[in-house]
Structure formats: structure tokens, C-alpha cells
Amino acid sequence: MGTMLAETRRWRNVARAGKWKGKRDRRMVLLQKESGTRVASVTKNEPARRVWPDAVVLREVLQNPARFLCPELDLCYGAVAADRNGFPLTFTGRFAVVFRLTLPGGVCVALRIFTSPDNSFGGDREARSERLMRSLTRLQAEIGDLLPPFVYLPRAVRVGETWYPAQVLPWAEGEPFLSFVTNNRDRAPVLRTLAATLNTAVDRLESMGAAHGDLQHDNIMVSESGERVTFVDYDALYTPDLSDFAPPAERGHPNYQHPQRRAAEYGIGMDRFPLTVIRSGLLLLADAPHLWKQTGGDANEGVLFTASDFAAPGVSPLWGAAKGWASLDAELAESLAALHARCVAAPSATTKSVSPLPNDAAIITPKLRRYPSRVTPTCDEEQTRPVSYLAPLYTLAFQREEAAHIHALRAYLLIAPPVVCIAWLMAWDFGGTKWPFLAYLLVLLSVLQVTYLYLAWGVKRQRDALDLEYGKLMEAERQNSERKKHLSERLARCKAKNLPEPDAWHEREHLRKVLSHIPLSRSIGEIGVSAPVVRELRGRGIGTAAHLWQRHGFLPAGTDAAQASLLRTWLSDLEVRERERFAREYNPVLALEERLARMTRQSEKRAARLAELDEWRASFPDASFATFLRRLLPSHLRFTSSRV
């Protein structure tokens, strides 16, 4: 009773202080039974909906990660970075709160917990995050550590009885952008280096068809004296794989964006305006360091320029000072001219690239591996190249080859009969009735030659290849049906036994034991990782696949991006293979279901290919021997046929 009175008295004091305003807009305080925290609330008149925690609630929850974090990626075993008072350090954004965790193995990750509903991202957050996660993994070799990959967990942190999503990504090493600029505002070469690095980074993103969408001081980490940058916060990120998603609600910081920017300005070119703002500010600061304090320094939340300078550049005092310094610096003058042109233009008018890109004719595309057409009777991992059998028949090269073939056969038929007759007479004359076998041998050779020329006919070869693939597919489908029937019976028997499913702990223990016996040097021969990178990682304590797996694929800072992508791919393949092996050994029901699903997908592919082959067989020209003989006759002497 005393606790309830104390709680009532405390909130009454809060209301008197003016922090709890309005009777009609009062919000209910939801006390969670397990975490003992207050969660963001809903109005009494609002319908029941999901309630999202705020930074205060998450800070209290993260004091006990073993209880309120999920076991995925060993989050529940991690140590949260704390301040001097022992409370978790928080980095609060518009849509999420970031915590720093040190996982088992010493790897530091950023746990980004969402604090807003899905409509803040213009649609389904989970689908968008899954697509973005796959897209960054695919582009990792080209983008490198500019945009580190992340893992999306739909059930990452528990507040009370509700699970909330989060992103897990490697902790970005470096210094925050504004802090770096403040500490180096008197070092002009460092600022110019940082401007060039950012220009190269954005140009690299554009070359891959991507854009960050919210370039500002809070989303840029700087290291190595301005020669290396890392972008964080992927709320507004754009890649070609996200083109079918609605634009997010995030429009960027006003001190870095066009004053008239709307949500529709979302795409590959949306980083050009903020890059020009940052580049102009850094170059101006390199020439005039005293402007940093005059414009408010880091409290200005920008690099000298603010939203008011973009809205009215003609009356801005900063623009007047910048033009004076631009007369002494050609690079600054060029950057300021580009910024002024983009300020007075529409936000969608930024169509020029950050740096000139080559035209389509100058772009050299890499050679793609071509796999041979193969249909295995055992239906294991079929690799079928989409071969067309009708299209080559109508090419100019094929028609020339067929014409040469027909002319050669006509010449042979003109020469062969007289030669055979002469040989017959000579054999009859010299050997009488006892030695005509030479003539019969010549006749047999002539028949064999005609047969060979028929089989070498281009139309006949194409038809034989078509029939061969059709027969192989039919045989594979027949064997696949028998195997599916056998596996379905086994699945029914396994389900009838009600076998217990293994828990996640046994699966992780199986992975740890198996991966601990796989040295990292095996990746050199299996996937082409360079030996110096393996030696460097071994020196840092990463000598086996288990060490890499315990770090969840997050490699130390400075590792080559292409090699890191290869190692993550190698580890992912190992993990998938061992998980399937564990499922087959300890969960036969799941293994059988996966095999049946895989065989069903293969049957669907074969059915589509068989339907295509049926259409080609129906419309294929007649390749019989009679048609071949008719082709030997002149065109005015041939029998009419609709399929010749």
C-alpha cells in the first residue's frame, strides 16, 4: 500500500511540474511485470496496438542482457558497454537506440533496437531489412567496410512479454565526424583529405547503384586521419534491390538536405546535395578556420552551413564570406558554385554524378562463368543451361553450313555411282564370279558414307540433341517421382514415431565441435582466400572456422573487404552444410521435409523445361531421312511439304 501511495505521489509531482500535460491527452503508464520498467504508452481513446519502448526503458532492460536478449548470435552472453555509473551507454536516433556489446570471443557489435512502428519505414520493416541485408552482403566485395553488413533479428530484445526487432552489425571504429572536424579544424591537409575521401566514398556507392540517404555528422565515422570513413544508420539506405519498396519517412538532417526535399526524392542521386554541403564546408574551413567558432562550432550541428543558408543563399552572411575565400581557392570556388546551383534548383535536379562516370561503351563487364548443360539421372543439383534448339536453325551461319553440307553431298552422289560401276566391272572382269566382293564393299562404303552425312546434317543434330535432353528429363522425372514416393513413406513413419526435436544448444555445440577442427587455411584452396590474410588473422587469434564463427563473421578492422566477403561466404557454406548434417542425424523429419521440398522445386523446373521442349518438338522441322534426300534435289523438283 505504501508503494502505491509513493508511486501516485511521484506522478502527481510530475504532473504539477508540467511534464504530464492535458487531461484528454494523458497517457497510460504500463508497468512491465518482469522488467519493472515503464514503456512508451498509448492514449486511452486509441485502439489497442503494439507499444514500443523508449531509450529509458531499453537502458534499464539492457542492464540484464542474459534475461532480456535473445540467444541468437550469443547476444544474451554479451557485455554491454557502461558509463562511469554502471548504466549502459546509449546512442539515440530518430527510429532506434544503439548499444555497444562485447560478445564472447572479444568481438564488439552494435545492437540497434527499434523504437518506432513499421510505418516509419514506409512498409514492412522485416521484409525491407531482410532484402537490405542480402543486398549489402552481395555488394560487400565492392562496397567494403564503407557500409558494414548487418543481421536483422525480428525477436532480439524482450520487454515484458513482447519481443522487439533489432539490427546487429560490427561496431564502427573511428571518431564521430563532428568531433574529428573540431579536433582538426586547424589542419587544412587533413580536412582536404577528408573531403576527398567522402567524395570517393559517395562515388563508389553511386557506381554500385546505391545511396546512403542521410549523410550527416551523426552517421559518419572517421579514422586514419581522414583517409577512411564508415557510414552508419541504414534507415534511408537505397540499393537497387530496394527499388520496389516505398520511400522511408527519413528525409535527412535539415542542415545537410535541400530545403524542399520530399520523400519522393529517393534514389541513387540523393547523396549529391549533402556531399556538396560537407565538401564545401570542409574546404572553406581549411581556408578559414576562424569561421568554426563564428558559426557556433559543433553546436551548430553542421559543417558551417545550415538550412537557412540553403533557403536564402543571397542574403546569407556565410555565403558572402565564402565567396571572398573562393577567389583564392579554385577547388573551393568550384564546390561553392555546385552548391549554389543545387540550392536554387529543384531537389530532383541533381542529376549529374559526383564525379564523371564512364559511358556504357567504356564499361568493361566481367566475364561470366558458363556451366555446361547437364541432367543427372539421380536428380542431384541439376545444372541445365537454357539451350535453344530452334533459334540456331535460322541463323545465317547455320544456313551457310547446311548449304555447304548439301553441296558436298550432291557432289559425292554425282561421283560415287560411276566410280562404283567401274569398280564393279573391273572386279567382275578380273575375278569373274568369284571376286565380286570388292564391288559389294564399295557399295557398302557408299551407303555408310551417305548415312554418316545424314547423321551429320545440322537439322538432324539439333533434333537429336533435343530428343536426348527430353529423354533425360523424362527419365530424371520418373526416378524423382519414385524417390519422392519412397521419402514420403519414410516421412510418414518418422512422424508416427513422434521423435523429439533437438534443442538449439545441442546444435550450437555440434557446430562448435565440427568447426573447431577446420583450420582457416582450408579456405585458401576451397574459395581462394589469400594466404597473407589467413596468416594475419591467425596472428590475431583467428585460426579455425570456429574462431570465425564465434565472431559471427565480423572480422577485425582493416581486413581487406573482398577477402572478408570470401571468408564470410566460406563460413556460411560450412554452417549450412553442418546444420543440414545435424538435422539429418538428430531430426530426420526436418531433413526429409527439406529433401522433399528440394525435389519438388527441381520437378517444377523440369516441368517448365519439358513444356518448352514440347513446344519446340511440335514446331521443329522434319529431320527424317526422306526429307534429307528431298533436300538433295533442286528446289523445283522437290515434293511439297509443310514442314520442310
Image (cartoon, rainbow, N blue to C red):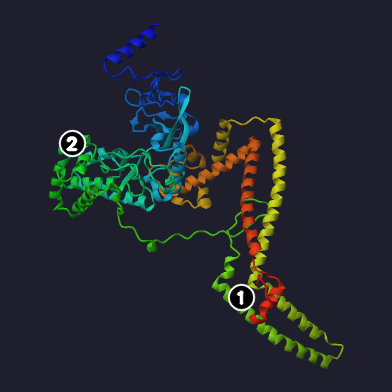
Q: Position of residue 212 (x, y in %)?
A: 35, 44
Q: Is residue 502 above or below residue 440?
A: above
Q: CA distance from mark 1 to mark 2?
A: 82 Å
For residue 60, which quarter of the picture?
top left
Tell me if mark 2 has few (under 14), some (14-19) or many (20+) residues whose alpha carbon lies within 10 angstroms of its own. few
- For the N terminus, the quadrant is top left
Q: Position of residue 406 (x, y in %)?
A: 64, 79
To which residue does mark 2 refer? Answer: 296
Marks 1 and 2: CB-CB under 8 Å? Answer: no
Total numbered labels placed on residues in the image: 2
Q: Is residue 165 above or below residue 640?
A: above
Residue in the foreground of this view, choosing between 268 and 158: 268
**Residue 7: image tag:** none
Q: Is residue 426 above or below residue 622?
A: below
**Element under disc 2:** loop
Tell me if mark 1 has few (under 14), some (14-19) or many (20+) residues whose alpha carbon lies within 10 angstroms of its own. some
Q: Position of residue 12 (x, y in %)?
A: 31, 12
To which residue does mark 1 refer? Answer: 402
